[in-house]
Amino acid sequence: IGVKIRLADTLIGVFLRAGVWGIGNGGNCRDIQMDISKSTQFLSAMLMVTPVTKSGIKIQITSEKKTGSYIHITENMLKGFGVEVNFDGEIYEVKGNQELHIGDYYIEPDVSAACYFYGMAALTQGRVKVKNVHADSMQGDMKFLDLLVQMGCTKTEEEDGICIQGPRKEDLKGIDIDIPRDELGLTNKIFWVGVVEQMRPSPPVLRRKARCFTAVPVY
């Protein structure tokens, strides 16, 4: 899209410095292809920057994975700013010269970080509430809470956040689950499930395609 970038050495490391003087080629973008099988962050970044370009852009997704929870969050955020993003199942299209309506924007708590505290409820038979985490969150790690329920925890939605109550140690259940390749976020927390499961006499089986992760119980 014509942004000028140079590598600059500093006393505190190396960073990329992008030209703040504007889009170097007048904001005329070339349509691109993108593989998001490893990360969707690059797609989110392109969706956020291209509405203010002159031409807009079409991004063809070449990977088997076409979308994900954080892409949905990006699209929802842009929609709140008045930006239109079209997706036909393979190509994302963002028109250029869109008018953004910027106002106050509420940023949800990081559910990825909250999962560790929720897991402690299962480990300690305690009760944990993370304020401002609610069931309507679009973050992929919300699926972790459903796994805790399968393991015997109780989940309740309260006015100021979701609460997890851990079960008695003898009531903590083992689970055998399959982790699809496209479950964004959840795979980052699957080893935390294994840690929680170590409190049980029998280990869980956590499957992902041909790979199998087994947590060894601690007695």
Image: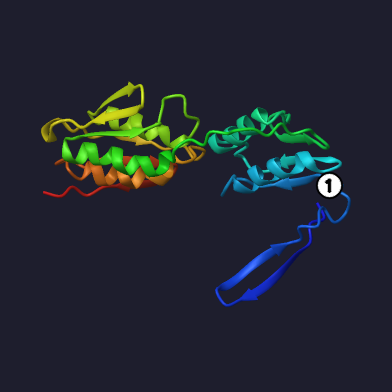
Side of 173 relative to 69 (left or right)? left
Side of 85 relative to 30 (left or right)? left
Residue in view at x 11 percent, y 33 percent? 170
Residue 91 appears in view: yes
Question: Is the image coloured rainbow, by chain, by secondary structure, or in one colour?
Answer: rainbow
Image height of 197 relative to 171, above or below: below
Where residue 127 sits in the image (x, y, percent)? 22, 33
Asked which quadrant contains residue 3, the reply is bottom right
Image height of 150 relative to 31, above or below: above
Where residue 124 sits in the image (x, y, percent)? 17, 40
Tell me how many marks there are.
1
Residue 58 appears in view: no
Comparing 210 with 125, the one in front is 125
Residue linked to disc 1:
29
Determine the secondary structure under disc 1.
loop
**Label 1 amino acid?**
Cys
Comparing 202 with 145, the one in front is 145
Residue in view at x 72 percent, y 35 percent? 92
Where residue 206 sits in the image (x, y, percent)? 34, 41
Asked which quadrant contains residue 204, the reply is top left
How busy is the neighbourhood of tag 1: few (under 14 within 10 Å), some, or many (20 plus)?
some
Residue in view at x 31 percent, y 45 percent? 192
Side of 150 relative to 112 (left or right)? left
Residue lying at the far front of the rendered structure = 104
Asked which quadrant contains residue 196, the reply is top left
Image height of 219 relative to 200, above or below: below
Residue in view at x 46 percent, y 24 percent? 136
Where residue 63 sits in the image (x, y, percent)? 64, 43
